[in-house]
């Protein structure tokens, strides 16, 4: 990660803005007495680009309380419901 940071630090502001545009990243938003404004902030750009470059951790909610993926619980419920016999009066 530090090599990426060094590489990005060597880029000009225009190059960083191009990367942000290519990746559809928003610039820094500030609110002033004139209202909301989007401004280029080099530190913000660097941190956003590096954040996007780093791998995101797996979501915690990917498994249910049983330890199985939630889709497995749904599949098992569907399977079990298909084997139920209707109640006859």
Image (tube, rainbow, N blue to C red):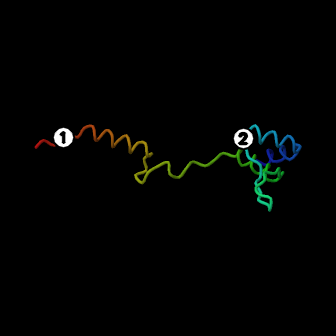
Q: Residue at point 24% right, 38% down?
A: 83
Element type where label 2 sits in the image: loop
Q: Quadrant of residue 65?
A: bottom left
Extreme residue in the left direction? 89
In this view, the residue in front, 63 or 52, is 52
How many neighbours does mark 1 have within 10 angstroms: few (below 14), some (14-19), or many (20 or more)? few
Q: Where is residue 35? Give x, y as percent.
A: 77, 58
Q: Residue at point 10% right, 44% down?
A: 89
Work out whether 47 lies above or below 76. Answer: below
56 lies left or right of 50: left
- Which residue position is annotated with label 2? 24
Q: Where is residue 12? Give x, y as percent.
A: 89, 43
In this view, the residue in front, 77 or 4, is 77
Q: Residue at point 38% right, 43% down?
A: 74
Q: Residue at point 76% right, 55% down?
A: 36
Q: Quadrant of residue 78?
A: top left
- Which residue position is annotated with label 1? 86
Extreme residue in the front direction? 34
In this view, the residue in front, 44 or 53, is 44
């Amino acid at each position: 990660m530090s090599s990426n940071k060094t590489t990005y630090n060597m880029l000009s502001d225009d190059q960083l803005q191009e990367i942000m545009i290519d990746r559809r990243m928003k610039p820094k938003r500030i609110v002033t007495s004139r209202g909301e404004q989007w401004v280029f902030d080099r530190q913000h750009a660097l941190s956003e680009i590096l954040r996007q470059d780093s791998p995101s951790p797996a979501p915690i909610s990917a498994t249910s309380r049983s330890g199985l993926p939630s889709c497995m619980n749904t599949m098992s419920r569907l399977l079990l419901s298909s084997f139920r016999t209707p109640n006859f009066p």
